[in-house]
Amino acid sequence: MMAAYAAAKRGQTVRLYEKNEKLGKKIFITGKGRCNLTNGCEVEDLFANVVTNEKFLYSAFYGLTNRDVMELFEGWGCRLKVERGNRVFPVSDKSSDVIAAIAGAIRRAGVEIHLNEEVSSLELRGGRCVGVRMKGQKRPVEADAVIVATGGLSYPTTGSSGDGYRFAAEAGLAVTECLPALVPFEVLEDDAKELQGLALKNIEATVYNGKKVLYREFGEMLFTHFGVSGPVLLSASSYAAKALKKGPLSLSIDLKPALSGEQLDARILRDFEEAKIKQFKNALNHLYPQKMIPVIIARSGISPEKRVNEITREERQALVRATKDFRLTLTGLRGYNEAIITQGGVSVKEIDPSTMESKKVPGLYFAGEVLDLDAVTGGFNLQIAWATGYAAGMSAGE
Ligand SMILES: Cc1cc2nc3c(=O)[nH]c(=O)nc-3n(C[C@H](O)[C@H](O)[C@H](O)COP(=O)(O)OP(=O)(O)OC[C@H]3O[C@@H](n4cnc5c(N)ncnc54)[C@H](O)[C@@H]3O)c2cc1C
């Protein structure tokens, strides 16, 4: 949509083919239905939030910055607000308003919108891309330029079925391996499953591959019936996906990251002082959420019935360890049905970063998630889509 808008603004005749019955089906479900459409950070800070191929995005991000995106949408009548972590949302909290804004803009710009029309292949002739073939139609649609913005493989019900990867491969372009990312983890341990539904704020999660730290972040997480999810772990999945394909990884959750081991021990001692004759299992209410207590007790190895004034220093240390290094084995990732994005895609080595045109096949452009680009949560993935779409539209329209 952004590519179509930019090309039409350049005065070109633009046809947009969408196989769904409406535009922006995926945008509709973004940000839990509120659409976190970009991030209000400093422009240069966008790059640190890109997981794969940040350098490729230099020209596109400066060509249509996050500020420019906000200005465009505000100009199209969609008022915006900035929330925690600089996440930008429509004031209405409705993703449908984001879709309506850009859909209105492309209509006014004169883009011909073809709904329920699926592109089946690219039309390649003499080493150039000269149009597309539509499903169920014999004759190709001729065009001076074609922009492929078919998205990734995640949430396939929104229309992202990976057609663009096939188009790229058929045109002779390299496509890197695709993996689900920003996706929950499955874990081995049964006790984690007992914690199902428990959301924890202010934890620190570290993902290890052997001794190597793949990811460390402070924030919120959630236990589920299969493993772990929530903002910090979704982001962790983007950094762990490749290594996890080779074997299990280790997750350490620090449940009390604000306290050092000694400080936590002192805090436990204080709590135990106040509850001297209580049994261990009844002395932990101030330290852990209710659901966590039986699991922590089991992991500490201390008998739940033991009176707290009989607990030894070594036992307390085991409790500190269970708290500051709550270990889980990450065995796999959930699939594309639950993945916010696809990692991997059309190799950026094939693409000119300032125009989004294929280096090998003139007239063929790629934009958005179909490219081997991905970022953490916070509005950065849509920023990638808007910026690369804009760059492709501007240069194809030239
Ligand atoms: C649950 C969820 C929440 C998310 N939340 C956020 C968020 O809050 N902020 C954020 O920045 N990102 C978010 N994302 C990621 C973001 O939605 C995507 O990265 C972004 O939509 C990618 O844009 P795109 O235009 O490349 O692809 P898409 O949005 O997937 O659009 C591709 C379009 O191409 C169409 N298409 C595909 N193949 C064909 C074909 N052969 N012929 C015709 N049409 C075709 C599809 O139907 C689809 O409409 C979220 C993703 C999910 C799944």
Image (cartoon, grey):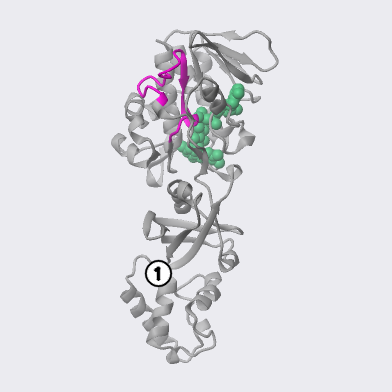
In the rendered image, is residue 241 in sight? yes
**Quarter of the image where ligand 1 sits:** top right
Q: Residue at x 58, y 14 (%)?
A: 132
Indicate yes or no whether the magenta region holds residue 236: no
Q: Could you tell me residue 39's position as x and y percent?
A: 39, 38
| Residue at which label 1 appears | 324
Q: Residue at x 45, y 36 (%)?
A: 381
Q: Could you tell me residue 104's position as x and y percent?
A: 53, 20
Residue in the foreground of this view, choosing between 334 and 316: 334
Quarter of the image where one finds residue 17: top right
Residue in the foreground of this view, choosing between 367 and 264: 367
Q: Could you tell me residue 103's position as x and y percent?
A: 54, 22
Quadrant where the image shows the C terminus? top left
Q: Could you tell me the amino acid type at mark 1?
A: Lys
Q: Secondary structure at mark 1?
A: helix
Quarter of the image where one finds residue 96: top right
Residue in the foreground of this view, choosing between 96 and 251: 251
Whether disc 1's CB lies below 8 Å from ligand 1 is answered: no
Question: Which portion, as a residue range, is magenta?
Answer: 350-373
Magenta: main secondary structure equals loop
Residue at the far right in the pictured view: 136
Report the number of discs: 1
Residue in the foreground of this view, choosing between 251 and 224: 251
Q: Residue at x 40, y 47 (%)?
A: 84
Q: Is residue 337 above or below residue 267?
A: above
Q: Is residue 284 left or right of residue 352?
A: right
Q: Could you tell me residue 243's position as x and y percent?
A: 45, 50
Q: Is residue 297 above or below residue 244?
A: below
Q: Residues within 10 Å of mark 1 (few under 14, many from 20)?
A: many
In the rendered image, is residue 90 in sight? no
